[in-house]
Image: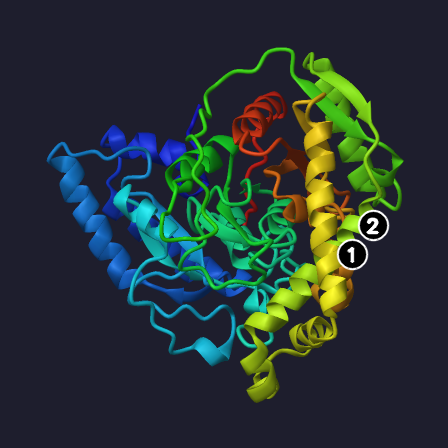
Amino acid sequence: MTPPPLPYFTLLAASRAIQAKQISPLELTQLCLQRIEAINPQVNAFITLTAESALTDARAATEEIARGHYRGSLHGIPLAIKDLFDVRDVATTAGSPLLKNNIALDDAFVVRQLREAGAVFLGKLNLHEWALGVTGVNPHFGPSRNPWNTDYITGGSSSGSGAALAAGLCYGSLGSDTGGSIRIPASLCGVVGLKPTYGRVSVRGVIPLAWSLDHAGPMARTVDDAAALFQIVAAHDASDPYSMRNPDPNLRSRISNFRMGVPDDYFFSDLHPDTEAAYRAAIKMFGDMGIELHQVALPNFEISEKASAKILLAEAAAYHLDRIEQHADQIGADVLTRFKWGLDVTGVEYALARRTQVEWRHKLEQLFESIDALMLPATPFPATRIDESDPVALSRGNLTRFTRMFNLTGHPALVLPCGRSAAGLPIGLQIVGPHWQENKIIHIGRAYEAERGEFGLAEL
């Protein structure tokens, strides 16, 4: 069987090729840069390309490996980073012209972890402005475009990460997730996204959106690729007040008699027909795999959505207060609208939302005493056309309907492909697990992916 072209390799397949001396990190990086030059104009995944430093780091990795100093599966692997994370000597723009000269003095903690593992950084990826949106349509840097059909949105806010991975421009990425910003583009672009437990991955050196809800995590092409990235970045950061000290997850642990929770009718109402068909097919596949399926009733999710929105908007407005007051003319209309909503959240409303957060976290922890994981759609529908996507409406709940409640509670959630629409657009499945037990959702996601087969990449 003829192997696929190198851009279509998974991260771990590329790593094995490097370790076997079939290709060097320098050659692999050069191929990525050539592909970016050819394809990025179609998908607009990158804000900043750091070709020179990438080639320098790739040469260093090539020489180090040649001397027998192989650091592990990420050594010499080209990655790209959402432009919310600091990468030293590179501007961190957060998708805003206000930060075009915001040159990072040091790496974000997680970037440093990846750098120490030997990764090569190709550049900074496009995002919805200030990470406050789910379409990936940025008025300053242009929209990221879905590689499966460039007339369609990628989802956001980690839009460039989804586009770059689906187009074969890099082998892995980091995204942030405050209401679904890793999982939504993973779903709409047909890649894998992992939102870890709140506090598992440091957010130091990452521009915040909402301190109480922000998560950082990996995006990749397969579950094993995402797990390889997660294993590196899931480390305690003593300098990050939100980072919690917990045992490193054993991602290779096996779980017998797996109990999968299937929610009630809330998750079947108002679904796109293709999404519902793919979701029901996934339920059947899990059953055929011998997974125990348990029908579960969840609390009123609309309450959690409203609480999450209050917290997110209030904290975003608090962080950006000076910009709202002094530079409103340089903030995109959809983002400015939501900032102003945040200013209108009262202290009483915020306090009640935080109380709901505690109650919901407790309710879901009780639920996970009887099941190992929960499965539900990632989004209610596939990607919509860029010219027909209302960023305010989609951010108010349409696209975040199945994601934002797990930012409120901090539970880990994995999204992976589970089908395509009649129009050929990806559909994502979401698997949610107990706090600190990413191993469970990775284990079952890996098993599902092996049974169904890898989704593949868009051909451009």
Percent of width and height locating residue 317 = 62, 72
Q: Which mark is on residue 306?
A: 1
Disc 1 element? helix
Determine contact: label 1, label 2, CB under 8 Å.
yes
Disc 2 element? helix
Residue situated in front as seen by the camera: 396 or 47? 396
Q: Quadrant of residue 246?
A: top left
Instruction: Residue at 86%, 40% (x, y): give it.
Output: 266
Question: Within 10 Å of the Cα at label 1, are there few (<14), some (14-19), or many (20+) other Cα atoms?
Answer: some
Percent of width and height locating residue 40 = 47, 61
Say what amino acid the circle numbered 1 marks: Lys
Residue situated in front as seen by the camera: 98 or 351? 351
Say what amino acid the circle numbered 2 marks: Glu
Instruction: Residue at 83%, 45% (x, y): give it.
Output: 272
Percent of width and height locating residue 316 = 61, 68
Q: Quadrant of the N terminus?
A: top left
Residue situated in front as seen by the camera: 416 or 62? 416
Instruction: Judge from the rendering whether residue 133 lies leftward or rightward of residue 392; answer left or right.
Output: left
Is there any visible trace of residue 51 in the rendered image? yes
Residue situated in front as seen by the camera: 237 or 397? 237
Instruction: Judge from the rendering whether residue 181 lies leftward or rightward of residue 85; answer left or right.
Output: right
**Residue under numbered circle 2:** 302
When the figure is inspected, residue 44 is found, relative to residue 188, above or below; the finding is below
Is there any visible trace of residue 383 in the rendered image? no
When the figure is inspected, residue 115 is found, relative to residue 447, above or below; the finding is below
